[in-house]
Image (cartoon, rainbow, N blue to C red):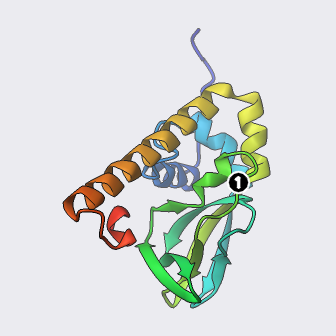
């Protein structure tokens, strides 16, 4: 069916959709699908050394880094081991797409400040419940992300005969 009255987006919306298109979880969505999420994103500024969340916290939101750097770390015997540092255009907290999930790592701002888009899990679930095709596309992207991670993990394991730093499995 042809759409005679196609939605027109403002320049600000189009720029946001272009940004979302570079985020792996959203790259399979078209602008109309992305527009459903737009009202629920809010931009929060975090200061240096501020925690976004800690390991074992409930996974209640998805985070997209607009600016700054965030270290994803695990705590081992009262020490934090950095798994990776993420930057503008990267997402984290994607396990919020899974039911009753908890954070597997801690997220801490390591730049002077970081602007981060926050998308609450409850809003994602609402969209998923009424738009199963969007859910399927995003879950496919999540599956691809987990598959890529497992490939890197197994490659690191094979090349180092089982002795390696865990951060080798995470993209730099």
122 with respect to 150 (left or right)? right
The image shows residue 118, relative to residue 2, as above or below, that is below
Q: Nearer the viewer, residue 19 or 90?
A: 90
User: Neighbour class for label 1 at 10 Å: few (<14), some, many (≥20)?
Assistant: some
- Measured as percent of width and height from the top left, residue 64 is found at 55, 62
- Please state the total of marks drawn on the protein image: 1
State the residue at coordinates (54%, 54%).
Answer: 16
- Name the residue that disc number 1 marks: 101
Q: Nearer the viewer, residue 144 or 91?
A: 144
Q: Nearer the viewer, residue 18 or 158?
A: 158
Question: Dividing the image into 4 quarters, which one contains the N terminus?
Answer: top right
Q: Is residue 30 visible?
A: no
39 with respect to 93 (left or right)? right
Q: Quadrant of residue 102?
A: bottom right
State the residue at coordinates (50%, 86%).
Answer: 110
- Measured as percent of width and height from the top left, residue 143 is found at 49, 40
Secondary structure of the residue carrying tag 1 is: loop
Q: Residue furthest left?
A: 159
State the residue at coordinates (60%, 64%).
Answer: 104
Question: Dividing the image into 4 quarters, which one contains the C terminus?
Answer: bottom left
106 with respect to 87 (left or right)? right
Q: Quadrant of residue 113?
A: bottom right
State the residue at coordinates (30%, 70%).
Answer: 164
- Measured as percent of width and height from the top left, residue 31 is found at 54, 38
The image shows residue 1, relative to residue 50, as above or below, that is above
The image shows residue 35, relative to residue 49, as above or below, that is above
């Amino acid at each position: 069916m042809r759409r005679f009255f196609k939605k027109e987006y403002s320049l600000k919306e189009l720029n946001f959709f272009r940004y979302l298109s570079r985020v792996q979880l959203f790259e399979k969505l078209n602008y109309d699908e992305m527009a459903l999420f737009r009202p629920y994103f809010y931009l929060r500024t975090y200061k240096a050394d501020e925690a976004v969340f800690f390991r074992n916290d409930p996974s209640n939101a998805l985070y997209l880094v607009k600016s700054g750097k965030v270290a994803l770390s695990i705590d081992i015997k009262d020490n934090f081991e950095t798994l990776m540092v993420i930057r503008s255009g990267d997402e984290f907290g994607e396990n919020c797409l899974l039911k009753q999930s908890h954070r597997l790592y801690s997220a801490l701002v390591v730049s002077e400040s970081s602007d981060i888009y926050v998308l609450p899990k409850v809003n994602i679930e609402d969209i998923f419940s009424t738009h199963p095709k969007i859910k399927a596309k995003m879950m496919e992207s999540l599956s691809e992300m987990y598959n890529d991670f497992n490939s890197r993990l197994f490659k690191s394991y094979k090349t180092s005969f089982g002795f390696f730093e865990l951060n080798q499995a995470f993209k730099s």
